[in-house]
Amino acid sequence: MRLGLGLGGLGLDSQGLIEQAKAQGVSGLLLDVSEARQQPIAEWRRQLAENELEVVQVGSWALNPLRPTPQTEEIARDALSAAADLGAPYIILGGGTKNPNHSFCGHPDNFTDKAIAEAAASLKPLAREAEAAGVLVTLEIHFATVLCDWDACRKLIEEIASSALKINLDAANMIRYYDYWSSSDYIRMGIETLGTMIETCHAKDVVMHDALHMHMDECPAGEGCLNYADIIGLVEAHLRPDTYMIVEHTPLDKLPAAMTYIRDSAAKAGVAIF
């Protein structure tokens, strides 16, 4: 297994991103397309080579496949271009939602075969462009979006039928109320259902608070319900040994503890990090 780091939203410049990656001992970076474009590609390449790092994923979360616009479709194409220029193997975006306010929040029309077909039609041109560019599109799953469960993920991948389209396993994004106390069983079901449709993984966590009505929040890996020793063991058993686990959505002051937790979990699972 390989470790990556995503620090989008923290306002770090390229040097700050690289310094954090080096400090945490990871080999790869997740960059939003805006971060990838904050300096010339040649300068990015120089800095990455000097620090023995690579860009793993270029994010294009602006594109909502169920509510696309010419502008957001252009951002996705730019992410493909940036990834190809940086030698990054993947771009990443969400599967889509009908919610007009947030690309990872729910809507009653998300959870249908019609929504899967619509998302597939929206994503097929991007998948074809990715094939030509030699880059893979990874879709970030989330229970509130069209990729609401493991069967929906499988159906969408099969509908698009492109070798350049895969799933990014973000376990925290899939935990619903009744999965919270048996999260390892639910994630095992997903990995066994999707198998090699999964290409990359994100590492963060989810915690439930004792409050009325229901309150569940993201949190750093190791602070919530997910057992990453179980998850890493499943990834090792079912996916390639060089699969990236990318730690994200973690404040800088909590990042060392989260990285230690992921490494300790890998050791507990008997999985080598390289």
Image (spheres, rainbow, N blue to C red):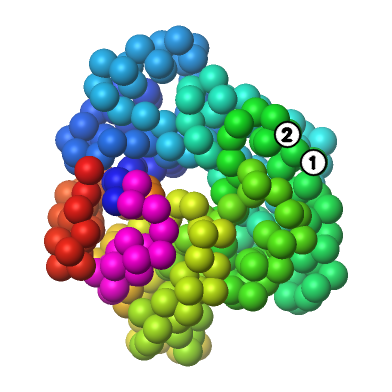
> Which residue is depicted at the point 54% across and 20% down?
85
Image quadrant where one finds the C terminus: top left
Check residue 174 for magenta coloring.
Answer: no
> Which residue is depicted at the point 39% across and 53% down?
240
Left or right, residue 133 beside residue 71? left
Q: Quadrant of residue 203?
A: bottom left
Q: Quadrant of residue 92?
A: top right
Amino acid type of disc 1? Answer: Pro
> Which residue is depicted at the point 33% across and 21% down?
48
Q: Is residue 184 visible?
A: yes
Amino acid type of disc 2? Answer: Glu
Residue at the disc numbered 1 = 125
Question: Mark 2–mark 1 contact, CB under 8 Å?
Answer: yes
Magenta part of the chain: 227-242
Residue at the disc numbered 2 = 129
Q: Give whichever of 132, 203 is nearer the camera.
A: 132
- Whether 203 is drawn above or below 19: the answer is below
Report helix, strand or loop for mark 2.
helix
Q: Quadrant of residue 105?
A: bottom right
Left or right, residue 101 beside residue 241? right
Dominant SS of magenta comes to: helix
Q: Residues within 10 Å of mark 1 (few under 14, many from 20)?
A: few
